Amino acid sequence: MDFFTIVQLGDASIRMAIPLLLACLAGLFSERAGIFDIGLEGKMLAAAFLSAAVSFASGSVWVGLLAGIGISIALSIVHGLASITFRGNQLISGVAINFFAAGLTVVIAQGWFAQGGRTPSLSGAARFDGIDFPGALTRVREKMQASPGMQFYSEFVSGHSILVYIGLLSVPLTWWILYRTRFGLRLRAVGEAPEAVDTAGISVVGLRYSAVIICGILCGIAGAYLSTAVQAGFTKDMTANRGFIALAALIFAKWRPWYALGACLLFGLFFAIDNRFQNIQLQVLWIMVILIGASAAMVLYAIKREKIDVIVLGGLSAVLTVIALATWVGSTGEEAGLVAALFETVKVPSQLIQSLPYLFVVIVLAGFVGKAIPPRAGGQPYVKER
Amino acid sequence: MNAPAIELKGISKAFGPVQANKDISISVMPGTIHGIIGENGAGKSTLMSILYGFYKADAGEIYVGGNRTDIPDSQAAIAAGIGMVFQHFKLVQNFSVLENVVLGAEDGAMLKPSLAKARKQLKSLAEEYELNVDPDAIIQDIGVGMQQRVEILKALYREADILILDEPTGVLTPAEADQLFRILRRLKQEGKTIILITHKLREIMDITDTVSVMRRGEMVGSVKTVDTNPADLAERMVGRKVLLRVDKTPAQPKDTVLEVRGLNVTDAQGVHRLKDVSFNIRAGEILGIAGVSGNGQSELLEVLGGYEKATGEILLNGEAIDLTGAHSDGQSRRNRGIAHVPEDRQHEGLIMEFSAWENTAFGYHHDARYQKGALMDNKAILADAQEKMDRFDVRPPNPMLAAKNFSGGNQQKIVVAREIERDPDLLLVGQPTRGVDIGAIEFIHQQIVALRDKGKAILLVSVELDEIMGLSDRIAVMFDGQIMGERLPSETDETELGLLMAGVTDTDAPHSVKEIEDNLAHAGTGEKV
Amino acid sequence: MEKMPKWADVILVPVVSLLLAAIISVIVFWSVGQNPWEAIKLMAFGAVGTSDFLGYTLFYATNFIFTGLAVAVAFHASLFNIGGEGQVLVGGLGAAIVCLFIPWPHWTLALLAGGAAAAVFGALWVTIPAYLQARRGSHIVITTIMFNFMASGLLVYMLSDALRPAGQMQTATAIFPEATHLPSLNDIAGLFGSELFGRSPVNISIFIALLACVGVWLLIWHTRLGYQIRAFGQSESAAKYAGISAVNITMIALLISGALAGMMAVNNTMGINTPQLVDNAAGGAGFIGIAVALMGRNHPVGIIIAALLFGALYQGGAELSAATSIPVQIVVVIQALVIMFTGALDQMVRSPIEGLFMRFSSKAVKE
Amino acid sequence: DGHSAGPAIIYDLGGKFDKSFNESAYNGAQRWADENGQEFAEFEITSDAQREQAIRRFAEDGNSPIVMAGFSWATALETVAADHPDTDFVVIDVSWIDMPNVRAVGFKEQEGSYLVGMMAGMASETDTVSFVGGMDIPLIRRFACGYAQGAMAANEDMTIISNMTGTTPAAWNDPVKGSELALSQISQGSDVVFAAAGGTGVGVLQTAADEGILSIGVDANQNYLFPGQVLTSMLKRVDNVVYESFSGTTDAGIVILGVAEGGVGVALDEFNAELVSEDMLASVEAATAAMASGELMVHDYMSDETCPALEF
Ligand SMILES: Nc1ncnc2c1ncn2[C@@H]1O[C@H](COP(=O)(O)OP(=O)(O)OP(=O)(O)O)[C@@H](O)[C@H]1O
Ligand SMILES: Nc1ncnc2c1ncn2[C@@H]1O[C@H](COP(=O)(O)OP(=O)(O)OP(=O)(O)O)[C@@H](O)[C@H]1O
Ligand SMILES: [Mg+2]
Ligand SMILES: [Mg+2]
C-alpha cells in the first residue's frame, strides 16, 4: 500500500466518520442526560430529506441545513415528550421515530417531487462543496503525482466540506461544555442522579429537554451532511444504519467525546476499507489461523465458565471450525493437495466484508473491547410521584 | 416574641389514592431543634419534601420568617434559606464531594471559579462545624457517615438557616449519631433552625426542643419535649397503648441446624464483602445479626438464600450446601428447607405487578402441589393464597389484587405467610418490620417466635437494635464484613452493641471518637481500615 | 384499589391510542394532497373488498401473528427483540433447506419438518444476541439490529451462491418440490365448492399461527416457565431472590421468540403460490411485529386482532398506492404512529382516562 | 374501479424513478401515452409477496398487454399467465418463459457493455477504467464482464477495477457508497467509470463529475445529467420494448435483443458530442457490425458464470 493510498484511506475514513461522529455526539448529549435515543437514525434521515428538499427549493444550502436541523429538533422534542414528559419507554419511542422518518420522508418526497421518494439533484449553492485550502490540489489525479506532504495537505487536510470541520470541532467543544461549564456539570449529573439535580434546585425536565434538543441539532447536521455534502440530494433510507452504528460507537467510547472521535474514525475506516477493498483475497492458511484461532479463544474462555458458555461458544467455535475446514478442503483440487491448498488464495465473500462493521459492533457490545458503564439513570424516566 | 422560622398551614397532599398529608399545620421557632415523629408512612417525609419544594402541596400555605412564601421548587426553598438532608441521599455517586456541593450553586457559566470558591468555603465550613471531608473524594468511595456530612455541607454552602434532616440516624451507629448531634447542637448555637425527622423516641428526647407527632397523614399535635415522655409519644404515634417488648419464653435450643464456616464474598467490583464469617444456629433459637446497614448483612442473607456466590463452607443439618455450583440458587435452598423473608419485599420478596395469589407461589412455583400435569394448577394456588391471607389477616383479603395495591405492612404479611407456612428448617429474616406499623410488627414478631418454638432455626437481620434485642436469643454484631462478637441479650446493652457495630471490640478499649469515626467512614466500602 | 377497570386498560386505552394515530395519519394524507376519506375508503376496499384482497389480508396477518408473538414473548421477559426481521430470513433458510434437499412424500410431513427447521434456524439466529445479553449485558436491541444486517448478508450469500440453481437470475432458491406445497385456504374452501379466498396465498399456516397463539397463551400464563418469564420480566431482583436464573430465562425467552419469528417462514416460503425463498422474504414483518405486540398488549388475543388490523393496513396500503400516487410507505408511517401512541406515549393516553375514572369513582363513593 | 382496460406496466422493486431501468420502462410507456393520447395503468411493488397479486389484479381488470420490468417476475408470471390465456404478457429481462401468451424479452447486455467498454478504453489516459455495479447478481456481472472485454479490446494492458455496491436490494439505492466506490477507483487510477447500479449510479456519476473524470451511464440515456462529463450511456432499450408492446406490434415468444436488434447500444447526443472522438465512433461502428454478423462473440458471464477479462 503506497502512501497516497493510506492518505486516501484516512481521508475516506474521515468523510465516512463525520456523520457517525455527529450522531455519536448527539447520542452522547442525550444519553449523558439520561435519555437513551435509538432514534438517531430517524432524525438523521428526516434531516437529510428536509435539508435536501429545502436546499433545492430555496437554492441555498444554508437554509436547507436550518430546515434539517429544525425537523430533527422537532423529532427530538417528540422523543422528549414521550420519554421526559410522559415517561414512556425510550426504546419504543426511538423505534417509532425511526419508522416514522423512514416512511414519511418517502411519502412527502413523493408528494412533493414525484420522483419515487427522492429529491432532485442539488447543484451550486444548494450543496456544500469542499473547501479548498490555499495551495491545495483539488483533483485526485493531480494529487497522485504530488509530494507526500502535499498529498497529505491536499487530501487529508484540505478539501472537505465545512460540515466536516464543524464535526471535528464539535469534539473539543463537546468536551469543553461537558467538563468545563456549569451546564455540563448539570448535564452529567442529571444522567447519573436526577434526584440530586432536582433537590439542588435545578429543573430535571429543562435540562433533559436541552440535552435532547442539542441531540436534535447534531443529528440535523449529520443528516444534512449526508444529503447536501456527501451526496447531492436525498434518496430513501440514505442514512443506511449510521444511527445504530453511532450508538455502538458511543458505547465503545464510554460516553466520552474524545473517545467518540476515535471510535467513529475506526468505524469510518471500516467503511472506507469496505468501499475500497471489495475483493479481498486471503490465503487459506490465514483463514484457518483466524477462524480456528477465534474458535480456540472462545473455547478457552468458555471452559473455565458455565455450562451455557460452553454450549453457546462451543457451538459457535464448532461452526467456525467447520467453515475453516470446509474452506480448506474446498480449495484442494486436482493440482493442489491438502498442504498446497493451504497456500491457495480464496476470495472472502463480499457479504462478509460488508458485515464486518456490524460484526465489530457486536464484538464491541459484547464488552470484549473494554467494559462500559452507561450513565446510571440512563433509560429510566425520572419519577417523583407515582 | 419573634416570628416562627417556619410555619405550615393546612398542608394537604395526595399521591393518587393515598392521602399522605391531611391539613397539616406546624410552626417552628428560630434557633430551635424541632422533632417530627410518626410511624412509617405517616407522611413525615412528604411534609418536609413539600417544605423543600420537592413535591407540590395540593393545598396549604408556607410562611418563612413570618412571610408567606411560595415554594414551587427546590430552587425557591434554597432561596428562602431552607436546606434538606433526605432520608435517601441525593448525591451524584461518581462526582467528587466538591462537584456535589457546587452542583446547582455555581457562580457563573464557567466551572473553574465556582469550584475554586467552593473549595475555600468548604475548608472554612469544615473548621467551623467540625465537618471534615476530602473535597476531592468520589462519593461512591466514602462511607455513609461521610456522605451525610456532604449533604449537610451542601445545605450550609447554600447558606441555609433552616436545616431539615430526614431520619439521619437510620444509617448511623449510636456513636456516630452522637457525633451528628454534636454538630446539630453547634448549628443551633449559631442560630440555625433544625427540623429532625425520626421515629426513635430516644433521639427526640435527647436533642429536640419541641416535637410534633404525625399519624396516618395527620398532625396529632406538637408539644415541648420537656413536657412529654417516650410512652406518651408512642401512644400518640400509634393511637393506642403499645407494648414495647416482645413476649417470649426462653429458648430451648436443640441440635445445630446451620453451621457457617469461613464464609468469604468478593463482589463484582472486587470489594471484599464478607470476611471469614463463621457462626452456627441451633434448632429452636433465633440468632440476631446487628449492624449498621452495608456491613455485610445483606450479602450474608444473599449467600444463605442462594443468590450470591461465596467461598467457605455452610452445613445444613450436617450436610454441605453448594456455594458456587449448579445448586447455588434460591430454588435449591428452598428444596433444602431454607425459607427467606428478604430485606426488600418490594424488590425481592414480591412481584409488585403480580396478583397476591401469584405471589403466593413465588419461589415455590416448582412445588408439586401447584402442578397439574405439565401446567400450573392456578386454582390450587388461588385457594392456598386465600387460605393464607385469611389466616394472616391480610387486608383486603382479596387474592386477585396486585401486590402493589397492598400497603407495606400487608405486603410484608403476604411474604411472611408464604415463607413461614413452608415449615422450613431454617428461616432467614431480613428487616422483617421495616415500614410496617406497630400492630403488624407485633403480629409478625409473634409468628417468628412461634416458629422458633416449633423448633426451627431462625436467622434475623435487622438494623433496629430494639428488634434485635427483643427477638434474639443470641446476638452477633457485624462490622465491615466481619462478625465482631457474639453476646447474649441478657448480658449486653445498646452501648456495647453500638461499639461493636462501630468496629470497636472490647479489647480495644479505651477508644476514641476519632477512631470510631475513621472506622465508620470506611465501613461498607471494603477499604482497609 | 385499581385505578381503572380492566376493560378500560385492554380496550379503551388502545382504542384511544389508535384513534390518535389515525388522526395524525389523516393529517399526513392531507399534507400530501390526498383526500383522507377517499384514501381510507380505498384502503378498506383494498383490504377486504374482494375475496382475493381478504385472502391477502389474512396472509399478511399470519406473518404478523408470528412476529407479534415473537416480540410479545420477549417483552414478557422485558426483552426487546427487534431482530425478528433477521430471524424470519434465517428461518426461511431452514425451511428452504429442508424442503429442497429432502424428498417429502406428503405436505403434512414437509410442514412439520419445515416448521421445525424454520423455528430452529430462527432460534439459532438469536442465540448469540441472547447469549451476549444474558452473559455480557450487551443490549439486545442493538445486537439484534446488527444481526438483522448480517442475516440479510448471509441470506444473499446463500441465495446468490449455494442455493441458487444454475442459470437462475433471481436471487432466490429454486421453487420447492410439489410435495412440499402447502394447501391454500382456497384449496380447502374448494373442497366445499367455495372460492372464498380467491387466488390469494393465504394457506394452512394460518392455523399454525393460531395454534402458536394458544401455545403462547398456555406458556405464558399456565406453565412454570411462563411464570418465571413474567416474574423475571417484572422484577429482575425478585427473580434472583426466587432462584429464577436470569441467564436461563433470557436465553429461553429469546430462543422461543426467535423460533416464533422463524416459523413465519413457513407462511412466506412454503405457503406462497410459488413456494421458494427470496432475498427480501421478511418484507418488514419483523418490525411490524413490534407494533402488533404493543397494540395487542402482548396477549395472543390482542395480537390476533392487531395482526388482522396490520394485515388489512398492509394490503390496503398496497392497493392504495396502486390506485393513487401515495407510496406504500404510508403504511410504515401509520405503523410508526401506532407504535408511538400505544407504546411510548401510552401514559399520555392513560393518565387522563385514569383521571376520568378516578373522578367518577370518587363521586360514586361520595354519593 | 379506476383502471381502464388499456395496457398496464408493473415496475420492479427499484421503483419507477430509479433514473435507470424502471425509469426507462416508464419513459417508453409515457411516450406511447403521449403519442396516442391514451392512458395506461401502472404499479410499483414494494415486496415480493405482491408480485403475483399485482399481475393478477391487472389481468382480472382486463388490462392487456401487461408489461413487467425485471427478471424477478418470472415465477409469478408463469402461474398467472396460465390462468389468463387471453391476456398478453410481456416480461423484460427474462429469456426462458415459453408460453403462448407471454413475450419474454432478454437483452445482450454484454454487447452494449462491450461497446461502452471500448469507448472507455479509448478515452482513458491512465489505462485504467472501472465499473460500479449495484447489487452483486449475475446480471450485473454480465454488464461488468462485457465492459471489461470491451476495454481490453481497446487496449490489451488495460487495468479494470470492478466493485459491487452490495448484496442486498439496498445496493440499488446507495449513492453515498457509490460515490465512495468511485473515489476509491479514481485514486487507483481510473479515469472512466461505468455505473450499472440503479440509483447508486447517480452518486457515481456525480463524483466522477466532481473529480473531473468521465463516467458512463446505464439503461436510460443519462448523458444529460452532467453535460460534457458523461462519456456515454449504455442504452438498454427497455423503453422501446414497452413502447412496442403497448402499441401492439409484437408477438409472443422469447426474444433476445442485442446490438444488432437495436436492443442495446450507446447513447450519442449533444451532451457528449465533444467527448466522443472519430476513432471511438469508428470502433463502435466496426464492433457493432462484427457483432451483428456474428463475427464478434462477446462472452456472456451468465452462460457459464465465468469471465475471461475480469475476476469477481
Ligand atoms: N412519591 C410517592 N408517590 C406515591 N406515594 C408516595 C410517594 N411518597 C410517599 N408516598 C406515600 O405517601 C405516604 C406517606 O409517605 P412518607 O414517605 O411521607 O412517610 P414517612 O412518614 O416519611 O414514612 P417513613 O418513616 O417510612 O419514612 C405513604 O403511604 C407512601 O406510600
Ligand atoms: N404505589 C401504589 N399504587 C397503588 N396504590 C397504593 C400504592 N401505594 C400505596 N397504595 C395504596 O395506599 C394505601 C396506603 O398505603 P401505605 O403504604 O401508605 O399504607 P400504610 O398506611 O403505610 O400501611 P402499612 O402500615 O400497612 O404500611 C394502601 O392500602 C394501598 O391500597
Ligand atoms: Mg420518610
Ligand atoms: Mg407503609
Image (cartoon, helix red, strand yellow):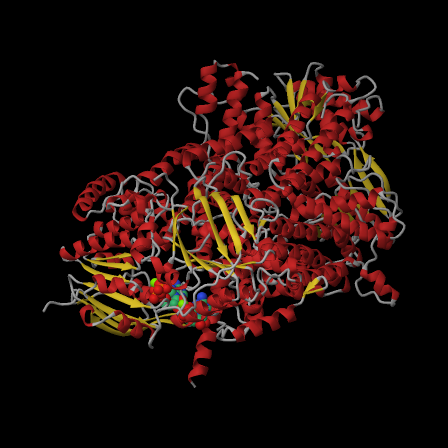
Name the residue rendered at 62%, 36% in the picture. A302
Q: Residue C322 location in percent, x, y?
A: 68, 55
Q: Residue C24 location in percent, x, y?
A: 53, 61
**Image height check: is D281 above or below B137?**
above
Instruction: Give the total number of marks visible in the rendering.
Output: 0
* Residue closest to the far left: B1
| Residue B211, picture quadrant | bottom left
**Image height check: is A24 above or below B464?**
above
Location of the N terminus of chain B (image quadrant): bottom left
* Residue closest to the far bottom: C367
Q: Residue B88 location in percent, x, y?
A: 35, 56
Name the residue rendered at 45%, 68% in the picture. B444
Q: Is residue A101 left or right of residue C187?
A: left
| Residue D307, picture quadrant | top right
Q: Residue A66 location in percent, x, y?
A: 42, 45
Nearest to the observer: residue B37 or residue B354:
B37
Nearest to the observer: residue C145 or residue D24:
C145
Nearest to the observer: residue A183 or residue C195:
A183
Q: Is residue B15 left or right of residue C311?
A: left
Where in the image, quadrant-wise, is ligand 2 located? bottom left
Q: Is residue B391 left or right of residue B381?
A: left
Location of the C terminus of chain B (image quadrant): top left
**Residue B422 visible at all:** yes
**Residue A236 visible at all:** no
Name the residue rendered at 57%, 34% in the picture. A360
